[in-house]
Image: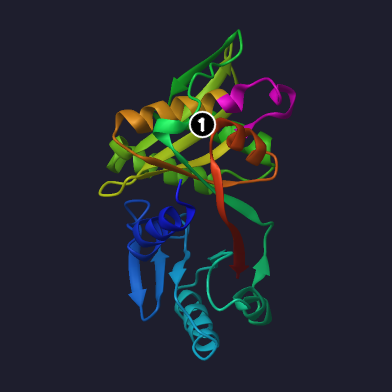
Amino acid sequence: MDHSAVLARYDRDMRENATPDGPGARIERAGAVVRQVADAHGWNGVLWSDLDPGSADRAIQEQIDRFTGLGRGFEWKLYGHDRPGDLGARLTSAGFRAEPEETLLIGETGRLALDAEPPAGVRLVRVTDPAGVDLVVDVHEKAFGTDGTGLRHRLLARLAADPGTLVALVALAGDEPVSAARMELVPGTRFAGLWGGGTVEAWRGRGVYRALVAHRARVAAAHGCRYLQVDASALSRPILQRLGFHALSTTTPYLHGR
């Protein structure tokens, strides 16, 4: 993989020319900043920027003013290769709070190891209705210890408005949901994003997460997607790299008013 070329394509297709991630969201372009504005349950934040030391502080304040005026907390999604190099420090000085850093991993579907299957007694079920969404949210809350209200809202809205671009899966051991994940297809690009992969503690280390990645990658390949993108935690990064993903950058959420 040509890391520089793929990263440039990712920045162009998925960030600078981003499309809304749900029916209640819209993309706004303000100078050298691209942001998404959504309702209170959706994702609000900055997707891309191309700033320099002379314009960065003003642009940061403009985003604060925009989202504060809407009554929204928001995220500035900062990548390790974004400019200027001290943008993270500038965000912190402006009142943002940094969340843990993740690794931007990208894999080519034609070169990934896609033969992983779930362990015995576990089956993967595609989510197509509110009952399935409830199972995904249940896993999310148990695996990550966070409230799943916003996730439930976004999944239900996406299934209702554009089900063809969402692949949500739950892994069931009997009738017990033990892992869940989703993939978002992005029409007009060669990319698909893997999101939300989480496994309840008692089932970690048994290959369920690996099987969910492989299943989604096979679906992406069938839809003609060349690349898969993941914002990987330290826990999932080695699993994904063994499957053939490459580390291209880092990403850190900087939160304001949340």
Q: Residue furthest right?
A: 202
State whether residue 178 appears in this view.
no
Residue occupying image coordinates x 52% and y 79%: 64
Q: Residue furthest left?
A: 188
The relative height of residue 83 versus residue 103 in the rendered view (above or below) is below
Packing grade of label 1 (10 A; few <14, some 14-19, many >=20) is: some
Q: Which residue is mark 1?
A: 134
The scheme the figure's colours follow is rainbow
Between 67 and 149, which is closer to the camera in this rendering?
A: 67
Question: Is residue 252 found left or right of 20 in the rendered image?
Answer: right
Q: Residue furthest bottom?
A: 54
Name the spot of residue 121 as percent of width and height, x first: 60, 8
Span shown in magenta: 198-210
- Residue 28 in which image quadrant: bottom left
Which secondary structure, mark 1? helix
**Membership of 76 in magenta stretch:** no
Between 217 and 66, which is closer to the camera in this rendering?
A: 217
Between 112 and 158, which is closer to the camera in this rendering?
A: 112
